[in-house]
Amino acid sequence: MARFDVLQQSDDPTRFVLLEVYRTVADPATHKETAHYKTWRAAVEPMMAEPRRSTVYGSVFPDDPGWA
């Protein structure tokens, strides 16, 4: 993982977005197999007001070589 941000919604402080930036397309799947991710997922599930969902974006800037 290259970056992990925790964002809080300005007009509703009970809502958060976790933004994860990975270096390769394969990295998210690899990360989800780690022990710390599985522990985190189990710990936060009861805190969720709604099921977690994922939205995938592509980098515009910096371009992929810019992350190196």
Image: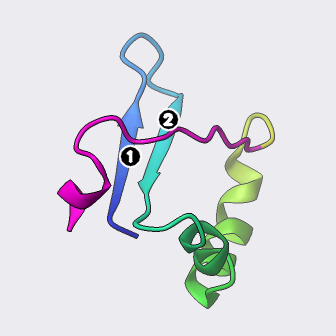
Please say whether residue 63 is one of the residues in the magenta stretch: yes
Residue ranking furthest to the right: 51
- Quadrant housing the N terminus: bottom left
Q: Amino acid at mark 2?
A: Phe
- Residue 26 in percent (x, y) is at 60, 72
Report helix, strand or loop for mark 2: strand
Write the residue at 74% across / 70% down.
Answer: 42
Residue ranking furthest to the bottom: 35
Q: On the image, which quarter does residue 43 sit in?
A: bottom right
Report helix, strand or loop for mark 1: strand
- Quadrant housing the C terminus: bottom left
Judging depth in this view, the residue of 60 and 46 nearest the camera is 60
- Residue 30 in percent (x, y) is at 62, 80
| Residue for badge 1 | 6
Q: Mark number for residue 16?
A: 2
Q: On the image, which quarter does residue 41 sit in?
A: bottom right
Write the residue at 22% across / 44% down.
Answer: 62
Q: Which residues are magenta?
A: 52-68
Judging depth in this view, the residue of 45 and 60 nearest the camera is 60
